[in-house]
């Protein structure tokens, strides 16, 4: 059951439609529990046995003979998060949710309700005991890390832009801040003794042309420059470790403008590093050292800049969690690396959500619409069929799924439209917060259902629009409302214009509204 962004009038209309489906009922009395004065965990443990909870739940894992005979078995309380809805993720809110589940029972299951037969104080004690059962670590929903896992990771890894492994040869690439190259060896020709990407192009012209169209090439964008305005050298270094990784780029404006340049990934101590099986079209140069490493064809090569440490966590997940999402998804198990999708045939375009065709290849959209008793219902589904991580993976982009009813002339019907944001919605006010996370894990589907009571609707228009720089557009807009130096304002204005220009419609289709509620999805 998804959440819906509706006006008060739309809610009233929808409530009327829902009520029409149900027979008249007599209003019941809501079950309310008195506030606990003290929580007795030991009392809860005794009640767990006395009330017969062990019959189905056992020690909490639900692995009992009685549970195996049930049509709906209890879930594992020792591993899974509490299922009942709650207003917050605090301990008190979870305890209240557990207490209400015990008091009301679980409809459709053998779980009875104990309200009125057990004192409220006992219900609170038993709820506290239920929460204490969850002691076994597991992969949490939506790649969330619990507090213990975060604490361990904080000790193990505290820096962004640092490789996760221990192999000393591979660690030369991103095992720590990249060292200065030093004076070039006399054996190198002038082009080889340069760190500029355009000099690499003399022998690697195909890769240079591809890189020139990439976001890596534009990693030192006006938006980054505006945000780094006034930073100290040390503060800037933490940003540039990924956006302009060579230390020489801090003092060389020309090198800095190249962003994530060729040497940032391939040159250490004036020695070239690259993948095995060098293309035969590249003639060997005896005087220009080359080291081949298998890491260039593995996803952990990308992890230093595409996986932030957990100290950046918001709601249990780092702000950038792409590598972990890939590890937990189906692609890693099948040997599909980041490079297979983002560097096919070793192309250096690094295409992602900013490229409309790449995004279109990653999703399928289906939709159906029907009318019954004057109520038009539209169901649209977006499936992540091509991304090995959540779609979208970072908090930067957002995709907007728009459903709009059209009349016989193709005009929108007033009040009959709705939008669903697909993405991770975060904001910062001295600390990070997450409003919502509606991203789609690999292979999974986001379903959006909307209904309106209206007449004259003939088709439903389904539009999937992508804003690749959604978060930064909002950031730049907020900054431009402030008093800024003229040069910094110009950078923000350029960055905002660039972000807005990258928006695109990934898919748009009109679906006929039929009278049968069993209409098949439109898969065109």
Image (cartoon, rainbow, N blue to C red):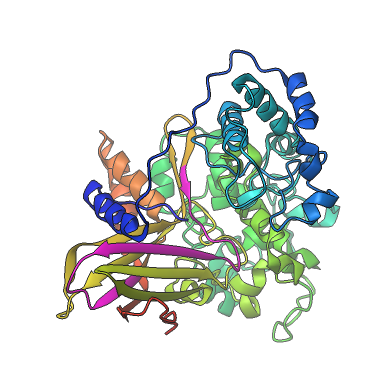
Question: Can you give x and y, in whole percent of width and height, for residue 492 in the image?
Answer: 32, 47
Q: Which residues are magenta?
A: 435-463
Question: Can you give x and y, in whole percent of width and height, for residue 417 in the image?
Answer: 26, 62
Quarter of the rendering containing residue 312: top right
Q: Is residue 71 left or right of residue 215?
A: right
The C terminus, quarter of image: bottom left
Q: Is residue 22 left or right of residue 240?
A: left
Task: Judge whether 439 appears above or below 231 on screen.
Answer: below
> In terms of depth relative to the viewer, which is nearer, 498 or 299?
299
Task: Judge whether 299 appears above or below 286 on screen.
Answer: above
Residue under the image location 66 percent in, 70 percent down: 339
Residue 436 located within the stretch drawn in magenta: yes
Whether residue 293 appears in this view of the structure is no
Residue 129 located within the stretch drawn in magenta: no
Task: Judge whether 45 appears above or below 285 on screen.
Answer: above
Whether residue 110 appears in this view of the structure is yes
Q: Is residue 28 left or right of residue 346?
A: left
- Report how many numbered discs are placed on residues in the image: 0
Question: Can you give x and y, in whole percent of width and height, for residue 402 in the image?
Answer: 33, 65
Task: Judge whether 348 appears above or below 425 on screen.
Answer: below
> In terms of depth relative to the viewer, which is nearer, 394 or 176?
394
Residue under the image location 73 percent in, 24 percent down: 44
> In terms of depth relative to the viewer, which is nearer, 369 or 49?
49
Residue under the image location 35 percent in, 69 percent down: 378
Question: Can you give x and y, in whole percent of width and height, for residue 74 in the image?
Answer: 71, 48
Residue under the image location 69 percent in, 27 percent down: 126
């Amino acid at each position: 059951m998804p959440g819906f962004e509706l006006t008060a009038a739309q809610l009233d209309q929808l409530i009327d439609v829902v009520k029409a489906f149900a027979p008249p009922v007599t209003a019941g009395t809501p079950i309310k529990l008195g506030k606990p004065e003290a929580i007795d965990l030991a009392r809860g443990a005794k009640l767990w046995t006395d009330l017969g909870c062990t019959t189905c739940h056992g020690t909490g894992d639900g692995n009992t003979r009685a549970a195996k005979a049930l049509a709906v078995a209890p879930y594992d309380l020792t591993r899974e998060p509490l299922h009942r809805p709650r207003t917050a993720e605090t301990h008190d809110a979870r305890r209240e949710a557990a207490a209400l589940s015990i008091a009301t029972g679980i409809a459709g299951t053998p779980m009875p309700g104990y309200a009125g037969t057990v004192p409220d104080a006992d219900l609170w004690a038993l709820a506290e005991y239920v929460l204490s059962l969850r002691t076994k670590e597991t992969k949490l929903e939506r790649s969330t890390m619990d507090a213990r896992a975060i604490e361990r990771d904080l000790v193990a890894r505290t820096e962004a832009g640092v490789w996760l492994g221990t192999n000393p040869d591979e660690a030369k690439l991103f095992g720590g801040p990249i060292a200065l190259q030093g004076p070039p060896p006399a054996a190198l020709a002038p082009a080889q003794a340069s760190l500029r990407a355009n000099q690499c192009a003399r022998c690697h012209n195909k890769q240079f042309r591809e890189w020139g169209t990439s976001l890596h090439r534009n990693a030192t964008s006006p938006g980054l420059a505006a945000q780094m305005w006034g930073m100290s050298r040390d503060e800037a270094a933490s940003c540039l470790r990924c956006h302009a990784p060579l230390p020489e780029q801090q003092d060389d404006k020309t090198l800095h403008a190249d962003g994530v340049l060729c040497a940032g990934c391939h040159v250490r101590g004036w020695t070239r590093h690259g993948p095995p099986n060098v293309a035969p079209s590249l003639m060997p140069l005896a005087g220009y050292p080359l080291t081949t490493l298998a890491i260039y064809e593995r996803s952990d090569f990308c992890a230093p800049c595409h996986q932030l440490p957990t100290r950046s966590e918001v709601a249990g997940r780092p702000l950038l969690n792409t590598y972990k999402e890939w590890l937990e998804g189906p692609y890693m198990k099948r040997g599909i690396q980041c490079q297979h999708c983002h560097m096919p045939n070793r192309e250096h375009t690094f295409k992602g959500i900013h490229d409309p065709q790449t995004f279109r290849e990653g999703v399928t959209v289906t939709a159906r619409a029907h009318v019954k008793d004057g109520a038009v219902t539209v169901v649209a589904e977006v499936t992540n069929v091509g991304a090995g991580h959540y779609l979208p993976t970072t908090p930067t982009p957002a995709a907007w799924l728009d459903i709009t009813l059209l009349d016989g002339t193709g005009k929108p019907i007033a009040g009959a439209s709705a939008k669903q944001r697909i993405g991770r919605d975060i904001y910062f006010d001295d600390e990070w917060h997450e409003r919502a996370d509606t991203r789609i894990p690999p292979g999974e589907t986001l379903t959006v259902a909307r209904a309106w009571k209206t007449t004259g609707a003939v088709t439903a228009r389904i539009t999937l629009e992508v804003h690749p720089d959604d978060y930064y557009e909002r950031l730049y807009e907020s900054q431009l409302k402030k008093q800024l130096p003229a040069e910094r304002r110009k950078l923000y204005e350029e960055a905002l214009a660039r972000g807005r220009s990258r928006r695109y419609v990934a898919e748009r289709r009109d679906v006929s509204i039929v009278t049968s509620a069993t209409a098949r999805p439109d898969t065109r």
